[in-house]
Structure formats: structure tokens, C-alpha cells
Image: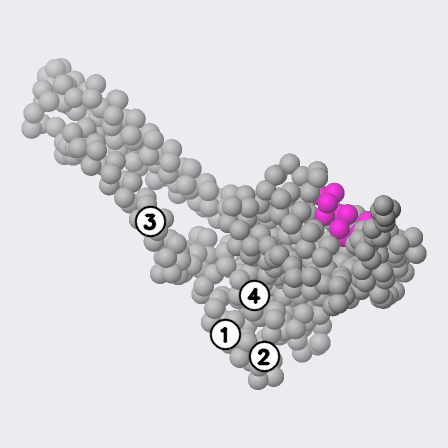
Amino acid sequence: MVPAVAELPLTKRFEWRARRSDGSQHRGIMESETYAGVVRELRHQGLSAVSVALTDLDAKPLERATPGDRGLSARFKRDEVLSLCTQLSVMMKTGVSLVEGLETYAAQTQCKEAAAVIRRIKDDVCEGEDLSVVMAKWPRIFPPVMISLLKAAEATGMMDQMLGRIARDLAKQRKFTRQVKGAMAYPGIMLFVAFVAVTVIMTFVLPKFRPLFLAQGDKLPLITQGLMALADSIHTHWILWISSLATVVVGSVMWARSESGRHSLDWLRLNTPIVKNMFKQLYVVRFAGTMGTLLAAGVSLLEVVKILRSVTGNSLYAGLWDELEERVNRGQDMSTAFLKSDFVPRPVSAMINAGERSGRLCETLDHAAAFAEDELDTAIKTATSLIEPIMILGMGVVVGGIAAAMLLPIFGLSKSIHT
């Protein structure tokens, strides 16, 4: 009987890139049974792994993640992206490898969908793909500006610092977006309260006075007659009213998602007197901060312009980006495009012009973003202080009008009794 021969472990050749604590870059090829073995050996040599990939001879066809996995992407919260970047930055600065950082985050996060996405990202990174390439498979989760910054970091080996910068930028964007949403949510809440108050009065209060009003016949004020007619219509045809309201709501949502609807809403944001300055400053914060960060990271100007199209989030800025791209392709200055635009405040365009002429554009863009942040804070406070009295006045007119329609017949009846 022939004795069984133990099967020898199969070694593979891995191409690696790593960085020492002093920032120096190193690369080479190592034989190992697993990816983890390469990472352990590099750490033993005092190196922090940046990327480890199978060589061309040993590489296998990879099963790629589904780019638009709607189920996982829809439940991956934006705050998770900020938390992921922050924690990866801290862990990599302390010597933890990228793969270990991803696995650690996936294990501690409370969101199951986030953990599933991060583990799929980790698996692809383990197979040798760059982090930027893997995250680009999930466009609904990771914004284009983040992918471009990661590509620049992979080229320079400064992944930990870039992740920290991405986290700071995402935190700023979240802060100002929440402030603007909070300012715009106030009118909606006030309108909802007014709608509920009117519904309660029309449904429960007005019927109590109906016999008294009918007894006066034609002597009722016109406002009271109109209010009673409306209440009768709601009571008799309530199904029609509910169906009409539902149709209006659904139609408004569908219209807002259409191209014409988005364009109209974008126009209103930039032209409505009370809130237009707030939105202009918000868009400046977005594009100036993003542009400065990308240029400082070494991203090409043409790539920066392409990313800016999705950063501002307003279709009316498309003309500005078209002109900017055309001027860059021709080798012309780009500050002229900002100076000619009606959507860029004059002080900001002047700063960009000065920065371009002095060769300190990145620094100037950071100053412009900081200036716009201060202006945005002021604009939000101003808009809120103006919207509040307007909404209170509107509610007072509606509720006061209904109260007057109910009280005027009572006053008229008391006069007739005394006479």
C-alpha cells in the first residue's frame, strides 16, 4: 500500500506596495500562501501595506460586486460614509492595514447593510483591487469627489491623510446641508399645523354652530356662507376631496422628479427673494471647497470640472461648468467664467480671479469656501427670521378668517336679540 503524501501548500506571487513610518514608498514581489501572509511579513519588516495584488500569472478572474445594488445602497446611510472615513484614517495612522481596518469597521457597525457592503469591498481589496476602484462600484454610496481623492491618495501613498481630509469635508457638507434643510423645514411644519387646524375646525367645530347659522337664513355674512358651503362639500364629497389631495401630492412628487420639475425647482431656489442668497452661498461652499481639495490633491483640472457638475446639485450651474470646461480645453483662464456668472457672488469670483493670477488658486479657494460658510450662516439666520413672521401672519389670516366667519353671525344674533 502506497503511503499518503501530504499535499504541499500552494504558494502564490504577490506584488505589493508599502510605506514606512517616515513616508518613504517601497514595492516588490513576495511569495506567500495568502494575502494575510504578505501583510504580516510586511509588518514584521516595519512596513505598512498600501496595496497587495496577485501578479499577472497568479491572478484569477474576479467576481465583481454589482455596481448598482439598490437594496444595500438605499440602506447605507450617509453618516456611515463619514464614520468609515474617520475610523479608517485613524486606524491607518496607527499602523493598521487597510484590510484590517475595513474588517474592524464591518464588525463594529450597527448597520447590517453597511457591514455587508464593507465586507464586499474588503474582499475585492484582498484580491488586489485599489480601494478607489472598488468604491466606484457603489456610486449611490460613495460620491465621485471621494473616488477622485482616493485615486490621488493611492498615487502618492498618503491614504490615511486623505481619508481624514475626506472625513472633514463630508462633515462640513453634512453640517451646512442640515442647516439649510432645517431652515426650509420650518415653513413646511407651519403649513402642516395650519392645515390640521383648519381641518379640525371645519370637521368638528363648525358643525356645532350649523343649526344656529341656518336659523339666520340670508342674513349670514358672505364669508360665513362660503365657509358653510365648503364644509358641506367636504362632508358630502369627502372621497372626492381625499382622492384629489392624493392626486395633487403624487403628481407634485412625480413632477419634482422629472427634468422640467427639477429645473423649475432649481430656478426657484436661486430666484425666490428670501432664500436665494442662502442657496447661492450653499452652492459656493460646495464647489469652492471641493475644487480646492481636489486641486490640492493633484487631480487634473478637467477631472475637477467633471466632478463639480454633480457637487453643486443645481441644473442651472450646467452653463457655468460648460464654459469652464471649454476655457480649460483651450488653455484660457477660468476665472473669467466665474466673473461672468450670475450664480457666483462677486466677492467669491474676485477671490478666484486673484488666486489664479497669483498662482495660489488652491489656497484662495479654501479662503473663498470659508468666506461663503460665514455668509451662509448669516443667510440662514436671516431667512429664518423673515420666514417666521410671514408664516405666523399667514396662519393668523387663515385661522382668524375662519374664526371671524363663525363669530360674526353670533354677534349679529346677539344684536337682534337686544333690539
Residue 252 disc label: 3
CA gap, disc 3 and disc 4: 28 Å
Q: Return the x and y of residue 392 as percentages of the image width and height.
A: 39, 37
- SS at mark 4 in the image: helix
Mark pair 2, 3: CA separation: 39 Å
Mark 3 / mark 4, whichever is N-terminal: 3
- Which residue is rendered at x = 38% and y = 33% of the image? 193
The numbered dot on residue 300 is none
Give the extent of the magenta segment: 94-105
Q: Is residue 366 left or right of residue 269?
A: right
Residue drawn at x 22%, y 36% as measured from the top left: 241
Was residue 95 drawn as part of the magenta stretch in this picture?
yes
The picture places residue 130, in percent across and down from the top left corner, at: 70, 61
- Picture coordinates of residue 203 (x, y %)? 25, 25
Which residue: 58% across, 66% down?
307
- Residue found at the very far left of the displayed protein: 218
Residue that carries the numbered disc 2 in the rendered image: 328
Visible residue check, residue 80: yes
Look at mark 4 in the image and give the residue it sits on: 308
Mark 2 residue type: Val
Q: If the image is split into quadrants, where does the N terminus sit? A: top right
Number of numbered tags placed on the structure image: 4
Instruction: Give the vertical position of 124 relative to 348 (above or below).
Output: above
**Relative to 32, does residue 55 appear above or below in the rendering?**
below
First in sequence, mark 2 or 4: give its number.
Answer: 4
Q: Which residue is mark 1?
A: 322
Residue drawn at x 30%, y 37% as measured from the top left: 397
The residue under label 1 is which amino acid type? Answer: Asp
**Dot 2 crowding, Cα within 10 Å, few <14, some 14–19, many 20+:** some
